[in-house]
Image: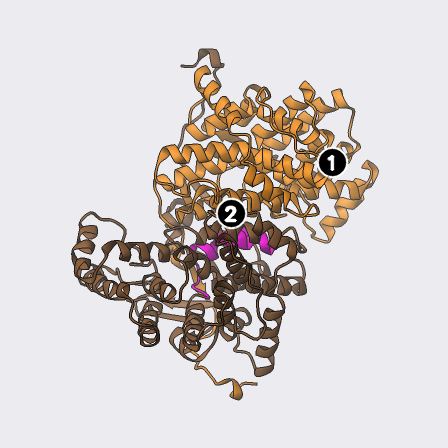
Chain colours: A orange, B brown
Amino acid sequence: MTTPEVQFVPGLAGVVAAKSSISDIDGQKGILKYRGYAIQELAEKSTFEESAYLIMNGELPTKQQLGKFDSDLKRNRNVDPRLLDIIKAFPKSGHPMSALQAAVAAMGMLYPRKIDDDATNDAAGLRLIAQTATIIAAFDRLRKGKEVVPPRDDLSHAANFLYMINGEVPSETAAMVFDVCLVLHIEHSQNASTFTAMVTGSTTADPYSTMASAIGSLSGPLHGGANERVLAMLNEIGSPDKAKAAIECKIEKKELIMGMGHREYKTMDPRATILKGLNETVFQKLGRSPLFDIALEAEKVVIDRLGARGIWPNVDFYSGIVYDKLGIEVDLFTPVFAIPRMAGWVAHWREQIADNRIFRPSQIFVGSGDRKYTPIEKRG
Amino acid sequence: MTTPEVQFVPGLAGVVAAKSSISDIDGQKGILKYRGYAIQELAEKSTFEESAYLIMNGELPTKQQLGKFDSDLKRNRNVDPRLLDIIKAFPKSGHPMSALQAAVAAMGMLYPRKIDDDATNDAAGLRLIAQTATIIAAFDRLRKGKEVVPPRDDLSHAANFLYMINGEVPSETAAMVFDVCLVLHIEHSQNASTFTAMVTGSTTADPYSTMASAIGSLSGPLHGGANERVLAMLNEIGSPDKAKAAIECKIEKKELIMGMGHREYKTMDPRATILKGLNETVFQKLGRSPLFDIALEAEKVVIDRLGARGIWPNVDFYSGIVYDKLGIEVDLFTPVFAIPRMAGWVAHWREQIADNRIFRPSQIFVGSGDRKYTPIEKRG
């Protein structure tokens, strides 16, 4: 009988790390559901606030529950002045993803580090979700030598973020489109950053340390960092007529094509389909992005050449083009991913600690057998 | 046939997450080896610098290699003035473990974030190992309203840390004892923080983000945070004659006894044995700690009552008493764990990215089946 002890599966692909009731993916059919609701329906009919509530609580909120959740989030948007001082000390040239990780870790110095009661954990979850957006916007303003724009409590989470980075209330289209982006990025089962939140959370670390760890994983180019790289790739290709040759060249060289392929999906990532449609919506109002036409060409080549092998566009492929059109800086794309994903991380962290066992996997040792220490004079 | 897909093992206990040549544990016999060398021999004959070199490079260094490694570490001890400014902005009441996580994350804003060449990765590894000690000491001095003590390059890593926190060159005994503590804590295979470094590292995140994630996991009370809690427990017990009843009461109530039991060891953790002996060495020079006698009594009860079930003292049980005697504050115990462990994390990170696949495990979905979205007016 094959036992897990003797099997090594790189990246733990297919290895069960949790029982979870938060989201479900059917990668063959390209289906993603949050708590049983199809992502398409939530993208169309829900808001970030409502879907975040759903992910964290398991049910869609009543009007009253949503009102309370929304006002709790708004009340938590302002960061502690001491946190703002820390952010002010960050070097302006730093990557905002490192700034976010450092700032969230620093929150652990300001709030209770215990995790043994629901009220403290509820408060921490709200604070983390609310303030991720504020931290990112504050750092972005400061590095540009501009004044920090304090959050407004008459704006949605999506509109408020765009307001805090630009200093102007966004158009209805921009706010709506960005809200859909937030909904799409809340949750995606056992991805590397969520898994990191579970592993760190399993040590009963405080929520700030735990989420700072998750942010570290999201920053990686093979994970959340990919959306930033997609835009660099599209810009490098330069024009739609050059896309075919450029992508084919990458395929020949077996280079990674950013935004293409996903461990879970063997067909089009449903979020990519929605984002592709969203781009059309944005363009009707704000003008077409030339990058979108490059992306469409690149997609054709990839599906044609690699689709049969299960390589299709993923969520990162079309998100950057939307963000770019909304006036979000390229190096903010990955931090922006963290804004909604924080709700998913918090949900998994709570699920983990509710029935906890510390993660400590095993290894196959492939190194030296017994060796005797030799004094340094006798080495060489 | 049982396949890993359908098995769920909480905490991934016994599930292979890596092939590794760094360290090896025989938990039945209580054996720990770094690269084939027994921990007892390294504790007795080696130094932190030599053992860290061994862990990272696979071989004990020649005299020349050790000299270079040692001077490289010394050269890297000073933190960037901008990092010091960030640390100065941290609230004095913050936990130093959160300070360390935030500061290491902030290093990602100061140094190259790429991980695609060995020279950059070597430099990052040295910098992280050297500066972890400096960051902790700087924060500790600042929170006490004292001047930061710059590192000295005529002291060993162990002696220099004690010098930076106390402002005085430590006695030979203190430096030697602390050096042994560092050797013992360098590496321990797939523990939660090392596993976190591997998971975050597998996203090809930069080394600073990666190590900040690992620090998040080490901070947890079920992991590195345990040593701090052991001391609290011993202090709470108060005197050796009360130890038996106090521990028996905890056993009755099925409470966790901090510093006791380990997933890997079913007998005495060899590091605990060495630390127990080290305490005797310290006491001969610096006077006996009453906490040690409480610990000895507590150990007797635990081994007597739970030893047959595999619950024995682990590394955390005796380390805190040594640190306390060396004048290290209780809330620095876990940060102090990170000083040597950084070398282990760096070794596993390099091993991971040398043959990388991103970690993305699977899950068993136990939530709702298909649900249709109901407009908010119709909920309740």
Q: Amino acid at mark 2?
A: Ser
**Label 2 neighbour load within 10 Å: few <14, some 14-19, many 20+:** many
Whether residue B237 is visible here, answered yes or no, is yes
Residue at mark 2 shares a chain with residue at mark 1: yes
Element class at badge 1: helix
| Residue A265 within the segment the image draws in magenta | no
Nearer-N-terminus badge (2/1): 2
Depicted B149 relative to depicted A50: above or below: below
Q: Which residue is mark 1?
A: A295
For disc 2, the chain is A
Q: Is residue B205 magenta?
A: yes
> How far across and how far down the image is residue B288, in percent?
29, 70
Q: Nearer the viewer, residue A215 or A208?
A: A208
Secondary-structure class at tag 2: helix
What mark, if any, has residue A214 been given in the picture?
none
Residue appearing at x 56%, y 52% in the figure = B103
Point out the frontmost of discs 2 and 1: 2
The quadrant holding residue B266 is: bottom left
Image coordinates for residue B232, horizontal then vertical, percent: 31, 54
Q: Residue at x 55, y 59 (%)?
A: B147
Q: Return the x and y of residue B265 as percentages of the image width and height.
A: 32, 63
Q: Which residue does the image show at 52% across and 88% down from the upper left?
A: A378
Can residue B364 be seen here? The reply is no
Residue B87 versus residue B32 in the image, above or below:
above
Magenta segment, which residues? B186-215
- Residue drawn at 57 percent across, 56 percent down: B356
Depicted B359 relative to depicted A38: above or below: below
Which residue position holds label 2?
A: A213
Q: Nearer the viewer, residue A195 or B172?
A: B172
**Magenta stretch, main secondary structure class:** helix
Q: Chain of mark 1?
A: A
Going by the numbered disc 1, the residue's amino acid type is Ala
